[in-house]
Amino acid sequence: MMASNRSQIGGWVAGIFLATLLWLFPGAALAETLALESLIQEALVNNRELRVAESRILAADFRITQAWGLPDPMISIGYQNEGLTKYTYGDSPDAQWMYSVSQTLPFFGKRDLKQGMATADAEGARAAYEALQLRVVARVKELYWDLLLLHRNLDLVKERVSLFARIEEAALARFASGTSPQADAVMAQTEKYMLRERETMLTQKIQSLEAMLGLTLGRESATPFARPAPVPREPFSPDEAELIRKAHAQSPEVKTREKMVAASEARINMLKREYYPDFTLTGSLAQRPGEYRNMWGVSTSVNIPIFYKTKQEPAVREAEAALQGARHELEAARLMAVSGIRDNLAMFNAAENLMALYRNALIPKAAQDFDLALTGYGTGRSDALTVITRLKSFLDYELLYQGQLTERAKAVARIEALTEPALPGK
């Protein structure tokens, strides 16, 4: 009986250490895996928010041409009659048909300023599109790593169920031989059923994450995803001062606000030019019958902005207030970028430290404690509660390690979204 227990113990320990190695150093020996790069490309092509942003860029580009265009010309047709009792055309020299064409010409520089304002708006739309692209990429990465973490956790939970089932078998065997109480088997059964519940919850979370990933990718159908491929832990040596400098100089979020400031400044210059009048040129023709000669004429008219106190001046003040708001938004974007970098750097550093602690100390120590407890249980020197507690601690540390590995990757992705000027390869 003792030899049989020791043989079982050896099998459990070997299985646990194999699972540990697969968790800490995941391989790529999977029949079908989900590639991160292909998901990113799919999101950049099909994400609905990006398509909306592209439409806004297209609309802004069309507004540039409109801003340069002249006002529509006016065509007038009229008739002048002599007397009120009858139609006198052809009988009176003063009865005539009149035709005219007029064209309004804005004051010098107005069209250029309007076009500059529209161009600044279009550039702002492009900067916003680039910022949205990076946010979408970061979102795909975060969902991908969260999905990978859930799959790994599900694997570990299944392995724990198997281990608790083996402990249950050993406890029942010892109970049958009278060497341990029935409570040992009951404890192992309880832990096993609790893990079954956790397995169901993890499966539901995987389905929820797949739904969110499908939304980000712009998929209309609920297509199941393959298991994510393990992402290599790429080296990352952050320098806070350099990252902040990059955020101020290259962040698409900051650039978007800078374009908004430029557009507001262009709008102020355009509205100030509204203090000056526009000119309307008119060419006219008077058509007379018979021996009376037709007449033509040319005239010009100028609008007089005498109501500038209630029209042009308030418009300029409104634009100046909007400019102040745009500048405040720019400063807020810079502060948000700095705050985001510092926040994610703190997460990155904490994840690095915790991963080192789990990998170099806690996981090996917990594995050793479990090995000793399991060996002691087989020889009768320890009870089932000790074995179960050590097993839970050992595998919980593995879960925590994987969680910090995921948090590290997500922090790097968010930092890149704040500091990259554009997508890689663009």
Image (tube, rainbow, N blue to C red):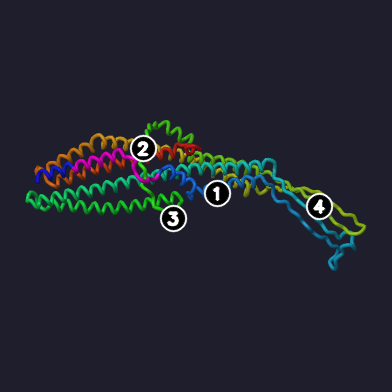
* Crowd tier of the residue under label 2, counting other residues whose Cα lies within 10 Å: few below 14, some 14–19, many 20 or above: few
Amino acid type of the residue tagged 2 in the rendering: Pro
Please name which of the two marks, 2 or 4, marks the residue nearer to the observer: 2
Please name which of the two marks, 3 or 1, marks the residue nearer to the observer: 3
Amino acid type of the residue tagged 4 in the rendering: Ser
Residue 118 place in picture, x, y as percent = 60, 44
The residue that label 1 is drawn on is 55
**What are the residue bounds of the magenta stretch?**
11-34
The residue that label 4 is drawn on is 284
Please name which of the two marks, 4 or 1, marks the residue nearer to the observer: 1
Mark with earlier residue (1, 2): 1
Residue 291 place in picture, x, y as percent = 93, 57
The residue that label 3 is drawn on is 221
Q: Residue 232 got which mark?
A: 2
Mark with earlier residue (3, 1): 1
Instruction: Classify residue 98 as left or right of residue 290.
Output: left
Amino acid type of the residue tagged 1 in the rendering: Ser
Q: Secondary structure at mark 2?
A: loop
